[in-house]
Amino acid sequence: MKRIVIADDSATARMFIIRCLQIIGLGESEFVEAENGKEALTAAKEKPTDLLLTDLNMPVMDGQTLLKWVKASPKLMDMPVVIITSAGNPAKEQELLKIGALKVINKPVAPPILMEALAAFIDD
Amino acid sequence: MPHQDTAIYKAMFDAVQQTFETMAFVEVAEQSEELELEIPAEASWVSILINDPVQAELRLALTHSLQSTMAADMFGIEVEEVNENQRQDIIAEILNTLAGLFMTRLLPDDQTYQLGLPEPGVGLLPEIEQDAIGWNLQIEGSPLLLVANGASLIALNK
């Protein structure tokens, strides 16, 4: 079973992402919800995590800071991180990919978009 | 009220349509008649700041019944089970999402932007400033009001 951490300060957004993941065939995964980057980092360190999906704009620790922490951690650096954001555009996307994000997806997320972004992960 | 063929009006209307259709599976339409911008008492609102490259505030107001219907559909629960937190969270996430889409549509590809966090509105929706831009829309007959304030954003509309 895959373990997926979802970080977003909105319960609606987390629920919506989980629904999309279920639709694209990841319904058997363990979903761990986090309300900010700090909670997500703690959750990812607790147990081996296969994928981290995070919002950018969050209180306490934002998604970009979370991404930097993950990529700086020998334990977590290989974990794929997908950014799902309402504040993304091509310039921001390039910045995040340079830091180490696997993909950057703009909200509103939809199953086909997640399917395409996570194709390699789903087949794995 | 802006003329409806301005870039700002279209960018926001498209953003609203895409957000509601994708997240809540409902269609947004313009009010068929020119109505005064008003929101019923049984409604709540949320705001978000655009901090860069313009300084502006967006406010979204929806009726409680529409929020509850969408929350029930999205959370897979009965309308009666929807609580205040869920209603507020849905309207906040919708505004957060459509604000990003709005800025993406409005700005060039190489232009970054920065949004604040959505904040629940307290009390009645503030009076709409004279130079604000308003979108007076509806979802299945239920009113949806969006207002944009901020001189630097409004200036883009001219």
Image (cartoon, grey):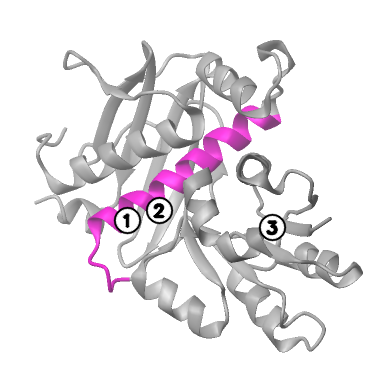
Q: Which mark is residue B100?
A: 2
Viewer-closest of A114 and A55:
A114
Q: Kindly identify which chain the residue marked by label 2 belongs to.
A: B
The secondary structure type at the circle numbered 3 is strand
- For residue B103, above or below residue B45: below
Three-letter amino acid code of the residue under disc 3: Ala
Give me the residue at 46% from left, 24% from top. B62
Instruction: Give the percent coordinates (x, y) of residue A101.
Output: 56, 75
Q: Kindly identify which chain the residue marked by label 1 belongs to.
A: B
- For residue A62, above or below residue B157: below
- Of circles 2 and 3, the one toward us is 3
Give me the residue at 36% from left, 38% from top. B18
Q: Which mark is residue B103?
A: 1
The secondary structure type at the circle numbered 2 is helix
- Of circles 3 and 1, the one toward us is 3
In the picture, which quadrant includes the C terminus of chain A? bottom right
Give me the residue at 66% from left, 72% from top. A80
Q: CA distance from mark 3 to mark 1?
A: 23 Å
The secondary structure type at the circle numbered 1 is helix
Residue for badge 3? A7
Residue A120 at least partly seen: yes
Image position of B152 (left or right of B96): left
Viewer-closest of A66 and A17:
A17
